[in-house]
């Protein structure tokens, strides 16, 4: 009999790190991870790791021959900054990788006669507000509003949500025997902040970069204006939300994709919070037109009431707790240990 597993792709990234720590608290979870890079030392012994390209058909075949795949957390993706430099490659990885895994999840569901669950982290990058006046007017954007992304990453995420919907509801709808379909569930994340990892390749990175620079006593040049506002959430809440959505009873879900968030701050307000804990922090604002216009197109806040209503979503860390209980103590410890 094949071993039943949870598969996490893109596991070496920031969300992967937090998700592996969260899921491995339950010893019944057998986790297999897949990423181009090795896992960091602190989580290496918590999973069985496959190192290689997410588009590799050979690795996929090997995976399927060895395991029964019960749940997939598909984290592998090129983020919004990196994707603008290599848009075709981003499409290949972000869309091609998702399509290949959705097909595999569908085959697994057929073979097991039980839906394989597909948990998909999407992003505020699926939204695209046309100008600052609209951003000011639409303070909390709901899931069905402004789905007009202006980055390749945002387009990829939005299309993959639609693909997930298709695989969940209509895949092979004209076949004689209706297949058991994939149980697709998506989450749109705001900017994420971790105490343990520094992000690369995104346009919401200025929040975490500012904090990590201050903790190391380094000056930071912020690439957006002081008044730039988007929503944020801590990494443990991101991992928790993925697992909460996975555990929610299907019949409670009124949508396939949900906004989740914690707090919304302008870049200047983040700087103020950083100064509370690191009074020597030095931040200058030098907004570049191109990245600024991407962040300006993202909503200042998102409405996550559907997630709160359907599966009791509630972040553990609001803005105060995020800084005082999670970010600052862990970041201080991290850089004290390395200095
Ligand atoms: C990025 O900046 O690309 C990501 C995101 C907002 O999804 N952090």
Image: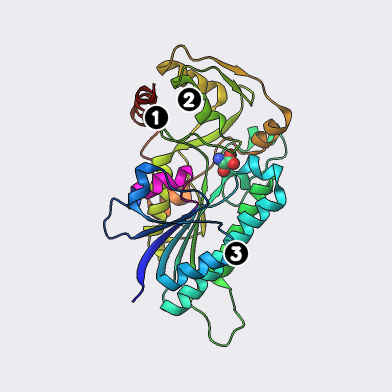
Q: Is mark 3 in CB contact (under 8 Å) with mark 1?
A: no
Left or right, 264 with respect to 223, comes to left
Would you name the residue on which mark 2 appears? Answer: 211
Instruction: Determine the residue located farthest toward the left in the rendered image.
Output: 27
Closer to us: 30 or 169: 30
Q: Is residue 54 magenta?
A: no
Would you name the residue on which mark 1 appears? Answer: 327
Which range of residues does the magenta coloring cover?
Answer: 10-21
Q: Is mark 2 in CB contact (under 8 Å) with mark 1?
A: yes
Say whether residue 165 is visible: no
**At 51% from the left edge and 60% from the top edge, which residue is drawn?**
256
Q: Earlier in the sequence, mark 2 or mark 3?
A: 3
Vertical position of residue 61 compared to residue 278: above or below: below
Q: Earlier in the sequence, mark 3 or mark 1?
A: 3
Badge 2, how many Cα within 10 Å: few under 14, some, many 20+? many
Vertical position of residue 229 compared to residue 268: above or below: below
């Amino acid at each position: 009999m094949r071993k039943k597993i949870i598969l996490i792709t893109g596991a070496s990234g920031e969300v992967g790190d937090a998700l592996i720590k969260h899921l491995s608290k339950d010893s019944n979870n057998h986790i297999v991870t897949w990423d181009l890079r090795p896992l960091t030392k602190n989580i290496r012994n918590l999973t069985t790791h496959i190192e290689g390209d997410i588009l590799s058909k050979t690795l996929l075949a090997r995976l399927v021959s060895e395991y029964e795949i019960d749940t997939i957390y598909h984290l592998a993706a090129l983020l919004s900054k990196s994707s603008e430099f290599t848009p075709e490659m981003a499409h290949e990885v972000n869309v091609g990788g998702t399509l290949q895994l959705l097909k595999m999840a569908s085959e697994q569901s057929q073979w097991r006669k039980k839906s394989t669950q597909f948990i998909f982290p999407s992003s505020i990058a699926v939204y695209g507000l046309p100008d600052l006046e609209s951003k000011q007017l639409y303070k909390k954007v709901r899931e069905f509003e402004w789905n007009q992304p202006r980055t390749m990453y945002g387009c990829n995420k939005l299309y993959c949500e639609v693909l997930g919907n298709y695989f969940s509801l209509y895949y092979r709808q004209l076949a004689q025997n209706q297949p058991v379909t994939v149980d697709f569930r998506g989450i749109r994340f705001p900017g994420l902040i971790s105490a343990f990892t520094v992000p690369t390749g995104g346009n919401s990175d200025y929040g975490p970069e500012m904090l990590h620079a201050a903790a190391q006593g380094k000056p930071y040049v912020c690439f957006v204006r002081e008044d730039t506002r988007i929503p944020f959430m801590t990494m443990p809440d991101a991992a928790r939300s993925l697992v909460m959505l996975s555990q929610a009873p299907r019949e409670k879900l009124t949508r396939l994709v949900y906004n989740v968030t914690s707090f919304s701050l302008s870049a200047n307000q983040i700087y103020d919070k950083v100064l509370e804990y690191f009074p020597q922090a030095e931040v200058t604002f030098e907004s570049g037109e191109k990245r600024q216009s991407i962040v300006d197109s993202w909503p200042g806040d998102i409405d996550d009431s559907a997630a709160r209503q359907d599966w009791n979503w509630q972040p553990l860390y609001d803005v105060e707790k995020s800084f005082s209980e999670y970010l600052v103590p862990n970041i201080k410890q991290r850089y004290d240990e390395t200095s």
